[in-house]
Amino acid sequence: MTKQLHDENDLVTKGYLKKEFKHYPTRIEMQMALDSLERRMDEKLQAVKDEILTKLDYIIGELAQMRQEILFLNRDIRDLRATDADHEKRIGKLED
C-alpha cells in the first residue's frame, strides 16, 4: 500500500520525507546493527573454534601417546626376539 500526496501541487519537503521514512532505519543505524551482528557472530565462531581446537588437542595427545606405546612395544618385541634367539642357541647346545 503506497501513500499518495493529498494534492498534486503539494511539495515534498524535508519534514514530509522525515515523517514518511521515520519507520525505516538510517544508514548509521544499519551500520550499528551490522557491527553488533558481526560481534555476535565473531563471539559464536570463537566459541566453536575453541571447542574444535580443544578436541583436536585431545586427539593429538592420544596419537602421541599411541606412538610412544608403539615405540616401547617395538623395543620389547626386539628384546624378546633376541632373548628367544639366545634361548634357541642354549637349547641347541643342551640337546647336542
Image (cartoon, rainbow, N blue to C red):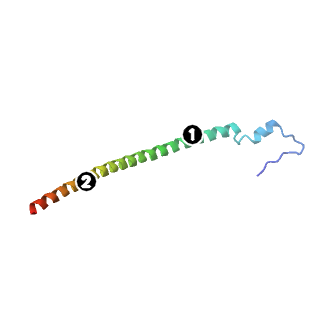
Residue 89's disc number: none
Q: Residue at x 46, y 43 (%)?
A: 50
Extreme residue in the bottom direction:
95
Could you tell me residue 52's position as x and y percent? 46, 47
Of badges 2 and 1, the one in the foreground is: 2
* First in residue order: circle 2 vs circle 1: 1
In the figure, is residue 19 to the left or right of 85? Answer: right
Residue flagged by tag 1: what amino acid is it? Answer: Arg
Quadrant in which the C terminus appears: bottom left
In the figure, is residue 84 to the left or right of 2? Answer: left
Could you tell me residue 61's position as x and y percent? 37, 46
Q: Which residue is drawn at 66% across and 39% down?
A: 31
Residue flagged by tag 2: what amino acid is it? Answer: Arg
Most foreground residue, 76 or 89? 89
Could you tell me residue 2's position as x and y percent? 78, 50
Q: Which residue is drawn at 48% across and 43% down?
A: 47
Residue 76 versus residue 13 in the image, above or below: below
Q: Around disc 2, counting alpha carbons within 10 Å, would you say few (fewer than 14), some (14 to 19), or many (20 or more)?
A: few
The secondary element bearing badge 1 is classed as helix
Residue 10 versus residue 69 in the image, above or below: above
Residue 78's disc number: 2
In the figure, is residue 1 to the left or right of 67? Answer: right
Residue 39's disc number: 1
Most foreground residue, 18 or 27? 27
Could you tell me residue 87's position as x and y percent? 15, 57
